[in-house]
């Protein structure tokens, strides 16, 4: 009797399982059939590893990338925010590889330390497109292309504005707010600027410290600079606009006039910087284009089609000096 009951139970359980499996298979077969109709229109999948949210520039780039699927119905985007940690970016790339995306986009927080994970992507035959910042790798075939700005040229253009303004023989005391330590955008902007003032031996960078590309840190570091150097400071060179905005606040709180008592020069071209320059609070902006989503799409399509890309697709950049230039440019600023 007991055995009979057990057999009945097992039979019911088996039936239920079959029904469940049957159900599952029918739904999965409908999924298969819908994906088979999709095979002709199979989406191109891009995995993008972003650095974080440190600046207005970064937000503009994020928006540009996140807009990709809206503008391109045949593209699926997987987006990951690294929250300022290289290890998070490496984990994101590994997860994109596991998910077998078609192309990986990477905005690398720092230049070094990417060899291993890029090799893994290469072994999986997934091309990597570097967006906005560059890497230093042992083998250049570890990435397909770098889409971004010439940071050395940006630094040089800032230096040229300063040397033109103060002239050959002036003794000029400069403080520098550096971007994220180890980032190509910081290293090269410093290099370009130093190169630009090298024939001006009376120009001195008297203080230089990182402000991590953020407004809050830019303000904090500028406060410390003002505390130790005070009115000696004639120029603030900020590696991005957000740190310049922080410096403006610090200078105002210190009781000096930014843009007048202290000349402020920075890079990016975000709207806030143009508003500040229109108000005379900052003096020079070297533009750096964050709207790289469409170029990432183009690169992904080309790679999927088997094309070899140029190793560096350079952004076009403009420079702007003074309140009038800022006022004229403001209505057209896109970020
Ligand atoms: O200038 C800065 C951002 O990598 C070019 O990163 C980018 C830089 C940009 O946080 O504002």
Image (tube, grey):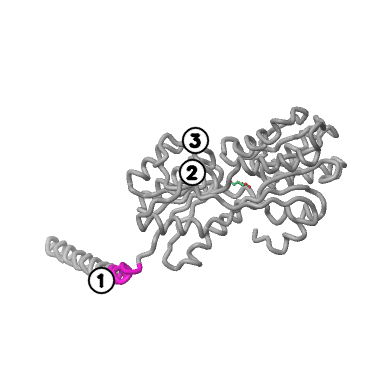
Q: Where is residue 320 in the image (x, y as percent from the top left)?
A: 72, 52
User: SS at mark 2?
Assistant: helix
Q: How crowded is mark 3: few (under 14 residues within 10 Å), some or many (20 or more)?
A: some
Q: Earlier in the sequence, mark 3 or mark 1?
A: 1
Q: Residue 203 sits in which quadrant?
A: top right
Please determine whether, in this image, residue 241 is positioned above or below residue 33: above
Q: Is mark 2 within 8 Å of ligand 1?
A: no
Query: Which residue has dot 3 on it?
Result: 112
Q: Which residue occupies 74% across, 35% down?
A: 175
Relative side of 227 to 30, left or right = right
Marks 3 and 1, how far apart in space? 49 Å
Q: Where is residue 162 in the image (x, y as percent from the top left)?
A: 76, 40
Task: State the residue lying farthest toward the right.
Answer: 255
Q: Magenta residues, as a range?
A: 30-41
Relative side of 106 to 278, left or right = left
**Depth order, front residue of 135/81:** 135
Query: Which residue has dot 1 on it?
Result: 26
Q: Which residue occupies 48% across, 44% down?
A: 89
Q: Is the magenta stretch mostly helix, strand or loop?
A: helix
User: SS at mark 1?
Assistant: helix
Q: Earlier in the sequence, mark 2 or mark 1?
A: 1
Q: Where is residue 291 in the image (x, y as percent from the top left)?
A: 57, 57
Q: How crowded is mark 1: few (under 14 residues within 10 Å), some or many (20 or more)?
A: few
Query: Which residue has dot 2 on it?
Result: 88
Relative side of 11 to 147, left or right = left
Q: Where is residue 104 in the image (x, y as percent from the top left)?
A: 43, 51
In reply to whether residue 31 is colored magenta, the answer given is yes
């Amino acid at each position: 009797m007991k055995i009979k009951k057990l057999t009945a139970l097992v039979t019911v359980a088996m039936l239920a399982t079959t029904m469940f499996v049957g159900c599952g298979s029918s739904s999965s077969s409908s999924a298969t059939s819908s994906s088979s109709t999709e095979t002709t229109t199979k989406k191109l999948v891009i995995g993008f590893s972003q650095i974080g949210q440190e600046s207005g520039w970064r937000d503009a780039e994020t928006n540009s990338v996140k807009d990709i699927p809206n503008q391109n119905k045949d593209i699926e985007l997987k987006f990951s925010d690294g929250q300022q940690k290289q290890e998070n970016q490496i984990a994101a790339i590994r997860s994109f590889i596991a998910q077998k995306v078609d192309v990986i986009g990477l905005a690398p927080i720092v230049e070094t330390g990417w060899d291993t994970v890029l090799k893994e992507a290469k072994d999986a035959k997934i091309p990597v497109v570097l967006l906005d910042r560059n890497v230093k790798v042992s083998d250049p075939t570890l990435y397909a292309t770098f889409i971004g700005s010439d940071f050395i040229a940006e630094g040089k253009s800032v230096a040229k504005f300063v040397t033109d303004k103060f002239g050959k023989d002036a003794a000029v005391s400069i403080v520098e707010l550096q971007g994220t330590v180890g980032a190509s955008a910081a290293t090269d902007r410093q290099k370009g600027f130093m190169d630009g003032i090298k024939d001006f031996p009376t120009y001195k960078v008297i203080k230089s410290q990182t402000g991590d590309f953020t407004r809050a840190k830019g303000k904090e570091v500028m406060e410390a600079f003002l505390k130790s150097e005070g009115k000696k400071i004639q120029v603030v060179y900020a590696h991005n606009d957000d740190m310049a905005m922080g410096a403006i606040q610090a200078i105002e709180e210190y009781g000096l006039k930014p843009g007048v008592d202290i000349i402020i020069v920075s890079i990016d071209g975000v709207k806030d910087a143009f508003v500040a320059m229109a108000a005379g609070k900052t003096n020079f902006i070297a533009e750096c284009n964050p709207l790289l989503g469409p170029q990432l799409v183009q690169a992904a399509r080309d790679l999927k089609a088997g094309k070899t890309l140029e190793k560096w697709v350079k952004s076009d950049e403009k420079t702007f000096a003074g309140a009038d230039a800022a006022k004229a440019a403001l209505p057209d600023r896109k970020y």
